[in-house]
Image: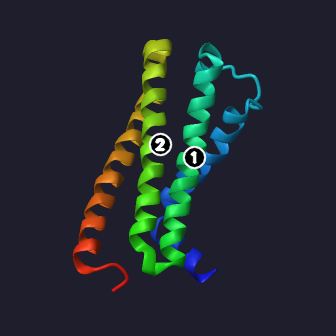
Amino acid sequence: MTAFLRAWSQYQFELFVAALCMFVGLPLALGVAPAPTSIAATLPDWTLFFWGASLSLGGACTVTGILWRAYNRLQFVAGLLVEKAGMHLLGASSVVLALAIGVYAGDIGILTSGIFGALFCACVSRIRTINKEVAVVREHGEGQ
């Protein structure tokens, strides 16, 4: 429990958003989400599946990578790389949704599109930070 609390104290935002994406995306990927009354209603079923799957897997990878580092300090780089994979999936699903909202909703969807665009930017920023962290850890030796 101490390792989880340490991870939570350092990465509250990442864990919260990743878990939220994971739980929102799972019903979409499984096709059991309630009938959408939003932009999702205009998208083909296969796009909802891939969008939901990337949200779920991205969230799961991000949470796993963060907790991996908290529980196993000797495999710090592996945890970073798992988190990075999650950030790639979350970023990709965010930008696709932002573009879809922008195209289908037009002016009325500008705020929602901007929120998902900002999430994409946050994912890109975290990926850049992870790349720097990996380089530093590899330079000084993992687990030391």
Q: Are marks 1 and 2 in contact (CB under 8 Å)?
A: yes
Instruction: Name the residue: 68% across, 19% down.
Output: 37
Query: Label 1 vs label 2: CA separation?
Result: 7 Å
Task: Please state which amino acid type lies under the numbered disc 1.
Answer: Leu
Instruction: Name the residue: 47% across, 65% down.
Output: 11
Quadrant of the rendering where the N terminus is positioned: bottom right
Mark 1 element type? helix
109 vs 70: above or below: above
Picture disc at residue 57 = 1
- Quarter of the image where one finds residue 15: bottom right
Quadrant of the rendering where the C terminus is positioned: bottom left
Mark 2 element type? helix
Q: Position of residue 96 (x, y in %)?
A: 45, 28
| Residue 69 in the figure: left or right of residue 2 | left
Q: Position of residue 4 (x, y in %)?
A: 58, 74
Going from N to C along the chain, the mark reached first, 1 or 2, is 1
